[in-house]
Amino acid sequence: MIFATLLLSVGGLNAQVKEKSNAKNSKTFKIVFQMVSKDTADHNAMVRQLFNIQKLAPDTKLEVVCHGPGLTFIQKDKSLVLDKLNELADAKVDFVGCEFTMAQKNISRDQLMERCRTVPGGILEIVYKQNKGWSYIKAGY
Amino acid sequence: MIFATLLLSVGGLNAQVKEKSNAKNSKTFKIVFQMVSKDTADHNAMVRQLFNIQKLAPDTKLEVVCHGPGLTFIQKDKSLVLDKLNELADAKVDFVGCEFTMAQKNISRDQLMERCRTVPGGILEIVYKQNKGWSYIKAGY
Amino acid sequence: MIFATLLLSVGGLNAQVKEKSNAKNSKTFKIVFQMVSKDTADHNAMVRQLFNIQKLAPDTKLEVVCHGPGLTFIQKDKSLVLDKLNELADAKVDFVGCEFTMAQKNISRDQLMERCRTVPGGILEIVYKQNKGWSYIKAGY
């Protein structure tokens, strides 16, 4: 059954990639994710999805904006997926923390993983990227 | 009170449909929903919303991409709304399952409702549709 | 630590506003939020985010569409943040209720805060605004 599913996947993948190559301006996909969950199951799902997307469409530009309870995703003393995040950062995934959340929760820059950046407002960052043609996906189940 | 609300609705409906006809390119609405919830209350709400949209704006193109725990929405042995989904499929709503989720959870194509299609990656399908001008709505409360 | 974070914020703010000024058509941001949560923690977060955005980018157009359980956000007898909502309405935030939800839950217009408007379908309102170039953000953690 797994084999059948994988065959199906490869067929489907061809179709989806072919479709993709016809997308407007032949541009690569650009996706900005909003992470607002502190639930580690949501964190694991996000990591899995990022790897899956890189497998299916390797040129996709990926950014994860973390704010509210979702800041824990990139917090050194809270996140359970830091190794994976560093691996994804190697592959140019852009992890972003919200400074409003940091100020509100009294979290300093050095409490976040090294390889992230911060922005004044997480939601404004997402909106800014949407205005530049990025697709928005809200993470979490 | 219900009567008043309905009157209000009809007035509002006229306004909204009039606005709609002024939308860019006079195109119909196109909405891609992301279903990631296994909660049957969310499934019921999704069904209700699809019917409501068809009532208000019958030409709207509708697609529901199911991935993660949301795949249960279109699983034969899990979904409690299959009859409604078939009715909606009759009305050309496009139900889509994610093959990554299927592989991860060892779910085969024949465990999904007949009248759906599958794609290699649910999120990429949503992003692909956004790039083609579809509006994204994340389902679930 | 708070001081450091604030310094960081101001630096980041400059960068983000500079970026913003380069956004296509030099337009202001326009954000339509979808509120579907009855959770008062989500309501408080929404209020805080609206104030934060107004602080960072005062020209941003803001709309909050409330439907399903999220209608409670603007219900006189349910909402715990009515004072804040009126303050935000003073600052031109547009609060919107869904008439489908009102009919379904038998809620009349006078049960909602004065300074909101209603639309036939909350989701269609969000989609309509997306078609007009507004950015969509789903509220709630």
Image (tube, coloured by chain):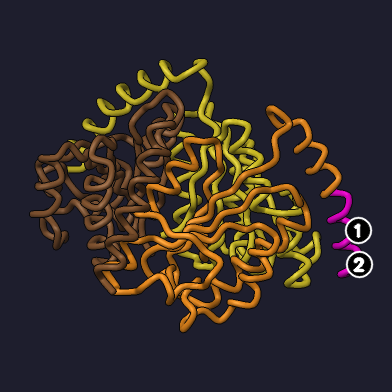
Chain colours: A orange, B yellow, C brown
Please name the predominant secondary structure of the magenta segment in the image.
Answer: helix
Do dots 2 and 1 share one subunit?
yes
| Quadrant the N terminus of chain C occupies | bottom left
Q: Nearer the viewer, residue B65 or A128?
A: A128
Q: Nearer the viewer, residue A43 or B37?
A: A43
Residue receiving disc 1: A7
Expressed as whole percent of the image width and height from the top left, the position of residue C113 reads: 12, 47
Residue receiving disc 2: A3
Identify residue type, mark 1: Leu
Q: Is residue B55 above or below residue B2?
A: above
**B126 sits left or right of B102 in the view:** left
Q: Residue at x 40, y 34 (%)?
A: C134
Q: Secondary structure at mark 1?
A: helix
Q: Which contiguous range is marked in magenta?
A: A1-12
**C139 sits left or right of B11 in the view:** right
**A44 sits left or right of A58 in the view:** left
Identify residue type, mark 2: Phe
Classify mark 2: residues with Cα within 10 Å, few (<14), some (14-19) or many (20+): few
